[in-house]
Image (cartoon, rainbow, N blue to C red):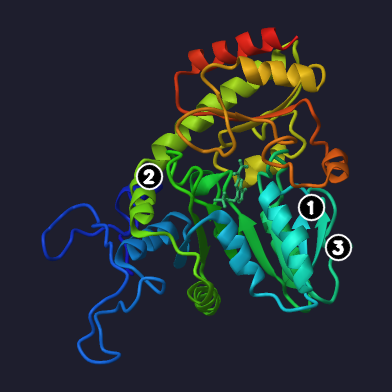
Amino acid sequence: MEEKKGHFETTVVHAGVKPDPTTGAIMTPIYATSTYVQISPGKHLGYDYSRTANPTRTALESSLAAIEGGNYALALSSGCTGTDILMHLMEVGDHVVSVDDVYGGTSRLFRSIWSRHGLAVTFGDLTNQPLSDFVTPKTKMIWIETPTNPLLKIIDIEKVVAQAKKLPHRPIVVVDNTFASPYFQRPLELGADVVLHSTTKYINGHSDVVGGALVTNDKGLLEQLHHIQNSIGGIPGPFDAFLVLRGIKTLALRMQRHGENAFELAKFLEKHPLVDRVIYPGLESHPQHAVACKQMKGFGGMITFFVKGNIENARRFLESVKIFALAESLGGVESLVDHPAIMTHASIPPETRKSLGIGDNLIRLSVGIEALADLKDDLENALKRSQ
Ligand code: P1T
């Protein structure tokens, strides 16, 4: 679909959305239909069954492709569906190299589901070790998450792509762009083959939908991915597609505020005597700050920090926050706080969590768009009560 090219702030409002040709309705209708009447067998108006395609979803897919700077997108029932569809590209005996710090659910799919189907995954620290340390002749995919969840490691996408392109079997490079959102980072422009999103997070932005997306410039790859999706399901319903499309319109405004609030709170926490260490890509103390400056337009809305003390201090902090809600997920307008070891990353084996540094006093913040002063007060009060 041809889109008018504009700045990101314009693209989020307009991409994929055309006035309804029959009524002029400015908003995309919610096409609540499972099937479509055919004029003659096999002759129809472009839609035959809603697992294959649905007009509300088509509008969302055009928007998703445009905001990621890609040619094609698939809208999915969840971010994990995207991971699962990509794994279906692999064959028995194939090998995947993944960043060591990934979302707990991604790790669970690799470790406990796909390993039973003959797929091997090696988890490596791609921040400082070359790809060649981890690849085998069977490596078909490189899995990057950046910033990573929950340690906010930054992987140099261009560098990994350059290394992957030199390999004789040329593995596909996937980037999970959920934490940055396309407002702050566009992996396809840095050479990645596929971008994955949990649209549950920033893209929808209102904590009222679970959804996912895959975006690519490669038509052949899109066709393979769509074939898999159409075969296994994993589609969003039209109402969810509508909500995500609606959320995207304010993505630029929301991300700007998420980023501003998070940067200020990261600086505040870094100076706080009851905080041991803060991880935020915008801080000069972040080990990959230079890479973040190179490949991101800003540093995002996520902060990870270590509260002084142990699990009991973390628990007291988490029970004391009043504006930050103790909940899994991220990327909504409201601020959330998470304890990865007990909550979002509980499915990662404890020894792996420990070796990665996901400790009992590690706390993850998803900074919302509320007033900065209120968020700061909330953290200050909870930190006082943590000791
Ligand atoms: O929840 P779902 O829409 O299936 O998305 C999975 C997913 C994929 N990738 C990243 C980087 C993610 O953070 C997630 C989901 N994460 C959480 C629910 C969380 O609280 O970290």
Q: In front: mark 1 or mark 2? A: 2
Residue behind mark 2: 247
- Label 2 Cα crowd, 10 Å radius (few <14 / some 14-19 / many 20+): some
Kindly identify which numbered label has been placed on residue 280: none
Residue type, numbered disc 1: Leu
Spatial CA span between label 1 and label 2: 32 Å
For the N terminus, the quadrant is bottom left
Evaluate whether residue 141 shows in this view: yes
- Secondary structure under tag 2 reads helix
Asked whether the beta carbons under mark 3 and mark 1 sit within 8 Å of each other, the answer is no
Query: Where's residue 247, x and y in %?
Result: 37, 44
Which sits in the foreground, 360 or 306? 360
For the C terminus, the quadrant is top right
Residue behind mark 1: 126
- Residue at coordinates 52% horizontally, 38% vertically from top-left? 331
Asked whether the beta carbons under mark 2 and mark 3 sit within 8 Å of each other, the answer is no
- Label 1 Cα crowd, 10 Å radius (few <14 / some 14-19 / many 20+): many
Residue behind mark 3: 134
Query: Where's residue 279, x and y in %?
Result: 71, 30
Which sits in the foreground, 183 or 310? 310
- Label 3 Cα crowd, 10 Å radius (few <14 / some 14-19 / many 20+): some
Picture layout, residue 252 above or below residue 278: below
- Secondary structure under tag 1 reads loop
- Secondary structure under tag 3 reads loop
Spatial CA span between label 2 and label 3: 39 Å
